[in-house]
Structure formats: C-alpha cells, structure tokens
Image: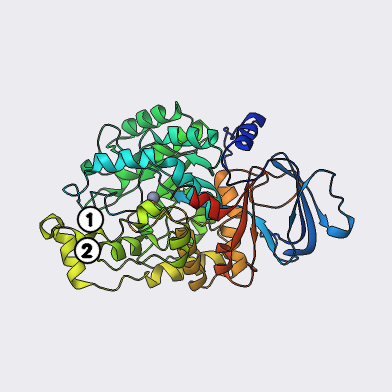
Amino acid sequence: MIRFARCLVVSTCILLVACMSTSSREDAKAIAITGVTVVYPERDTGTTLADATVLISGNRITAVGPRASTRVPAGAQRIDGSGKWLIPGMIDGHVHFFKSGNLYTRPDAADFNAVVPYAQEVARNKARLPATFKVWLASGVTSVIDVGGPFWNFEVRDAADKSDAAPRVQTTGPLISMVADPPLDGDDPPIVRIDSPDGARALVARELARKPDFIKVWYIHRKGDDLAKQEAIVKAAADAAHAAHVRLAVHATELEVAKSAVRVGADYLVHSVFEEPIDDEFIALLKQHHVLLCPTLFVPSGYGLALSGQWQATPEEQRLADPQILATMHDIEKMPKDKIPPRVAKLVAEKKPSTVSKASLENLKRLEDAGIPIVMGTDAGNIGTLHGPSVFREMALMRDAGLTPLQVLRSATTNGAKAMGRDDLGAIAPGKLADLLLLDADPLADVANLSHATRVIKNGVAYDPAALIAAIR
Ligand SMILES: [Zn+2]
C-alpha cells in the first residue's frame, strides 16, 4: 500500500486561535477523562478497558490506563467519564463538499434549475462550509475524505485546516471520468470527460500540482463501451498517481468494471457492487491488491426517497443536520407544478418504496467475512444523503447487512484511518492524535449508540455537539 506523502500540518497556533473563539468548545489545555470505558475497535479481543483514565496534552493522547494508577496532572481539565464510553473520532471515507444533499445539488439527476439555479446552489455550498464543518463534528465525525469535486475542493481542505471547528479533510480534485456531465460543468467542473490515456495523465498532472490525497476515477461503463479502451485510461491515471505516491480511488459499481479497476491499480473502491452478487475472483483480486472498500449502502435510496417526496429526517438528522438543508428537503410539496421536472413528478406520483438492494447488503457481509477492510462512508452531499448524521443511516444498514457493532465501529475508525493512510488516527493509544468521542451509551451493544456523543474531541479540543449546532441555527 502506498502511503501519502502529505500529512496534515497541525500547529500550536491553530490551537491558540481555537481557544480564543466560539463558546461551543472548551480550552485546549491538558484534559483528563476519568472513569471511562475505553473502546479499542482495532482489537478482536480485549476490546474495552473499564474505569480508565485517558490523558490528553495539546493535540495528542499521552496516557491510557486504569484510573487507579494513572495520575492526573495538576491543572488538567477533568471530564467525568463514569458511565460513559470513549471511542476514536469517526471517519467518513466518502463525502463531497460541493454538494449539499438537498434537491438542487445534482441537476444532472433532477433538473430544478427553474427553482434554484445550480450556480446559486454551488455558491451557497461554498459560503456554507463553516456550518457544514460544524455539522460533521457535531455528528462525531472528526475526519472525512472528499473523493471528488471541482478544483476548489483544495480550498475546502485549506479552510478546514485553518478552521477552529472542522473535521480533518482529505481531498481530491475533479473526477477523471468516462462520460461528460454538462449540467454540473460551470467554470470549475467536478467531472471531466477523458477519452485517452494521455488525457488522463494531463489531468492527473494538473491535480498533482495541488497535492491531492487521492486521484479519483469515475469508471462509468455503459452498454457498448469498449472496456479495454476504458481500462487503459484508468491504468494511465493509476500509474501517474502512483508515480507521485498518491493513491487511486475508483467509482465502479458493476462487478466486471470493479474487477477491471482493481486489476489496473485501484487502491480504494469508493462504492461496492450494488446490483449483482460478487464472486471469489473479485475477493481474491481485492486481497491481492490490498484494496480498501467503502460500501455506501444508503446513497441510492437517498435519491429515491428525496425525489419521490418520501424522504423523512431521522431523529439524528433532526438534531444534528444543517437546519438550512433540512428546511428545503420537502420543497417539492410547495413548488409550482410546472417547475417540477417530469421525471420527479412521475416518481412523486408512483411513490415506489426505496429500499437498499439485497445484493449490496449480501455483498458487504461476504466482503467482511472474507477479511476485506471495509471503510464506512456515506457519499454525503448526494440528494437525500446529508452531511453529518447520514453516517447513522449508513451504519444502521451495515448492521442490517449482518456486521457486528464492533465491525461497524472498526469500519468507521480503524479502517477509516487506513483509508486516510494515517497511523496516528483511528485508535486510542498514547501518541495518537486526540480525536475522540465520549458516548453515553455502549457502542458495542448497538450501533445506534454511536449517535449518543456528549463530547466530541478533535485535535485535543473538546466540543459540545448541541452547541456546535446551536451556533449555525
Ligand atoms: Zn461519491
């Protein structure tokens, strides 16, 4: 596995700035969480340490041990962890900041330009980034990987690095795509059609100049397309990325296409195979090439629910999603009929059930049982999949697929850190970065308990989730 050259630079100056603003978090002095049950998602046995004390100094964990024998330094801020659980901060391995999750965010799927022009939606998403960052933190997600968007994605990463309340952000630029997507183009397109290996190398070179964490290919294969010709483009992108020690993330949702992607160098499949059963050859390829896989179970249903007027906010979304987005999710009901795209009007009239495909659930269970590292990711930003609390929809579906709470938690922490190529995240141990969640219910008893964070600690700074959301209302 190729490691990233780039690491997030965390300076004390960021911490000092963090200390001076917003009332939603506490000072970044030494913190002692006492009497807490520490959870080790990376372990198969001995997954908890009860009645523990965890010490944080600056942005690092400095000690983890039994409360009786772990001395709390004088002056440390004490957080009473009795009756609570401590887990690593969660990582969403698949998000898109250029999209908001609302109805107006994918005019290629549903053209609502007559209601909200797409350029206005993109401008709104840019301007709203500070709130979107807070929503992620409030949901207990302390790192995200943006796997594709316009070149301004790199500014998103810079903004998160400089922000006092934001997740860590890894990112890539425009998708190297097999197809054009004109409704999204604007002056900084997120998706760029490439029709030759040379074209792929040229776009990768432009992105490498911005130090991407991944290069991303949108491997869309339609009936009649020449798979060998497409594969040569993917290989050119993979080789160019790898030559610069950057990994390749690929969207490939059909079995033959996903196999092709892995054969020529995909390091990270950002979706699973959705509609057909996977096979032994696929699993063997994933193992042979050390590929990580992000199943993104909910995102297709998100479109189906939102565009048929059936989307309903979950209790977690009501509590933790961006109120500005929640307020628009039912806009179809109040739109003039002549402004509703015909395809959407049909979906609303039919109100078909929008459930997750059986194949995608069964494939996930089979991949997990085969030992493939599964990375939790939502594809947040797509219509119906909101930034932040959609992680709880995703993890509930992973449970429904048959994963244990420990396996789901591991996908959202340990394996998320693997996807980021970071060994200083995703676990609770001395020397790791202090990205932690304090939960008031046992995450190993029920994945739903992962939404019960009373404190979110990112980079050694403790935040109150409710205060983060109150700050953006
Ligand atoms: Zn995506």
Q: Is mark 1 within 8 Å of ligand 1?
A: no
The quarter of the displayed image where residue 234 is located: top left
Q: Position of residue 432 (x, y in %)?
A: 70, 45
Q: Amino acid at mark 2?
A: Glu
**Compared to 242, does 454 lie above or below?**
below
Q: Is residue 241 visible?
A: yes
Identify the coloring: rainbow
Q: Amino acid at mark 1?
A: Lys
Residue shown at the point (24%, 43%) measured from the top left: 118
Which residue in the protein does label 2 denote?
A: 333
The quarter of the displayed image where residue 119 is located: top left
Q: Is mark 2 within 8 Å of ligand 1?
A: no
Which residue in the protein does label 1 denote?
A: 223
- The one nearer the camera, 210 or 12, is 12
The crowding category of the residue bearing disc 2, from other C-alpha atoms within 10 Å (few below 14, some 14 to 19, many at least 20), is few
Q: Is residue 266 visible?
A: no
